[in-house]
Image (cartoon, rainbow, N blue to C red):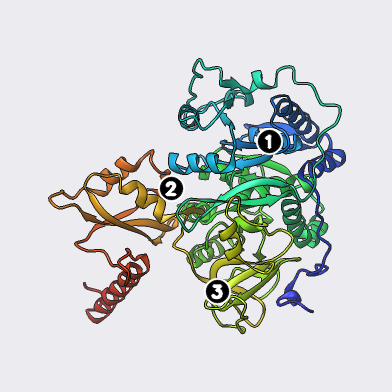
Amino acid sequence: MGHPGEQFYPEGVRWDDPIARGTLPDLLSAAVAEFGSRPAIEFRDRPISFTELEALVETAASAFLRAGYGRNSSIALFLGNTPDHPVNFFGGLKAGARIVHLSPLDGEIALSHKLTDSGARVLVTSSLSALLPTALKLLDKGLLDRLIVCEDDHWGRIGAPQTGLPENPAVITYRQFIDGAAKPEQWPAISPDDVALLQYTGGTTGLPKGAMLSHGNLTSAVSIFDAWGKPGRAERNAIERVICVLPLFHIYSLTVVLLSSILRGNLISMHQRFDVEAVMRDIEVKRATVFPGVPTMWIAIAALPDLDKRDLSSLVIAGSGGAPLPVEVARILERRVGMKLKSGWGMTETGSPGTAHPKEGPDKPGSIGLMLPGIEVDVVSLEDPTKLMPVGETGELRVRGPNVTKGYLNRPQETAKAFVGDRFLTGDIGYMDADGYFYLVDRKTDMIISGGFNVYPQMIEQAIYTHPAVQEVIVIGIPDDYRGEAAKAFIKLRGGAKPFTLDELRAFLTGKIGRHELPAALDFVDELPRTAVGKLSRHELRMQQSSQAASVKQQQVATGGRS
């Protein structure tokens, strides 16, 4: 066996299994030809068949082409989990455009940057009050030429509030947009090398960078997961019911849930938001078989007071990704419901796949698993990224594979810095054990992963600096039992300014940054640490905090737990 860990692969899976590379519209067409009338999506208890999905996609693509959004265009999607997402995602791609995912969790600063950077002048959003007012603000700022609004009640009953459309020729309902759009004689030619998706991720300057993911990257990503799951599928020979509660604008959900389910003819059971009881109904009543979640979802399930009495037996595949899974949560689920939950690792830049755990294999708590077929992961020196580290020694993880991005839009320097030849430097620090299992210990960057979402301290700092009482601020990540990590702000006040409460700060920041970015803790300090050249030092602050925490712990031990 030539690759580390390959001896633990599921039977019949090899590292060098062929990985298919094509285009996403072809992936959908092949699934429609194979699965036809089978339901592809269930939303608000209404099924949408593969054939119906393709018809909706072709209508969207025809309307995009008629409006001039074809090749060399960027179409931004600002949508939650509804069928509007796959319809416009595949519709835009079929028209030859590239998709830009905007997160409904983002604040105005990040959204404005993503629109400007990507060149997207058209935005598809929803009439939901959680989305439309923000989209209208972006239009008012002159960042868009056209706003297409999908009416959420089109999909049946609706409980969430909706916002009415203003009288503005630049704002159009989705129904009006597609009305009378005729199919072209020929669809635009698309190559696997064409960029399909601009998926934004952290930037060293605090502004997100657009990872360019090609059709080939994303179809390879789906094919890698497909190769890995082949033996399990052959053994079961069943149509899976896949819970889709992870947001589709996130790369993990896009690849693992949407694209993988379409490829295999599975049913996507789509939820608009995570509601623990709605998910449990899907599992216990509708007998869902696959549930990819993030740690916060598993923490909520593990915390159910009647967990011992709940029936999770229908789940064949339960995964955790997006952020490290607390070992304690995995233990609770195993102890109380006999469920082994293991987390893998991947990145926006890899189109999601990286590592995973085989069903059978050594038990390695805290590990992120083995490298998946077709993907090479190795560990290199933090000082010299060309120097390989021996087994068991810590360094930076590098990755190479057909799923890895070719770089960042408009960022030639950052792209060059991120690669050693054709190997991508992940910024994740970890090691590989003698069995080929990988472990993560830290991240090179200052990014905080909170509930599976990337949070960038500098974005939060920029917003806090707009508070009139703040002179200086550093934001760092602190451990959080629920989200894995949360942001904490350390603030030095201006002379004569009065301190304020955490709630007051959060109220001030609401709307400026995303809800998931709001600080969970606040400290006022007389001075903030600096580097030798006088720059505020996040690294130094983290060191101070960890040594303080260690000395408090020592005191508690010395006093028998009394502080």
Camera-nearest residue between 262 and 414: 414
Q: Position of residue 210 (x, y in %)?
A: 58, 50
The answer to whether residue 213 is above or below residue 104 is below
Which label belongs to residue 516? 2
The residue located at (43%, 56%) in the rendering is 482
Q: How many residues crowd mark 2 within 10 Å: few (<14), some (14–19), many (20+)?
A: many
The answer to whether residue 87 is above or below residue 332 is above
The answer to whether residue 393 is above or below residue 352 is below
The residue located at (72%, 51%) in the rendering is 218
Q: At numbered mark 2, what does the secondary structure look like: helix, strand or loop?
A: helix
Residue 243 seen by the camera: yes
Number of the front mark, 3 or 1: 3
Residue topped by disc 3: 430
Q: At numbered mark 1, what does the secondary structure look like: helix, strand or loop?
A: strand
| The N terminus: image quadrant | bottom right
Cα distance, mark 2 to mark 1? 28 Å
What's the residue type where badge 1 is placed? Answer: Glu
Residue topped by disc 1: 42
What's the residue type where badge 3 is placed? Answer: Gly
Q: Name which of mark 2 and mark 3 comes first in the sequence.
A: 3
Q: Name which of mark 2 and mark 1 comes first in the sequence.
A: 1
Residue 316: name its quadrant: bottom right
Residue 288 seen by the camera: no
Camera-nearest residue between 280 and 549: 549
Q: How many marks?
A: 3
The answer to whether residue 478 is above or below residue 430 is above
Q: Position of residue 142 (x, y in %)?
A: 49, 29
Which label belongs to residue 328? none
Left or right for 376, reference 160:
right
Q: How many residues crowd mark 1 within 10 Å: few (<14), some (14–19), many (20+)?
A: many
What's the residue type where badge 2 is placed? Answer: His
Cα distance, mark 2 to mark 3? 26 Å
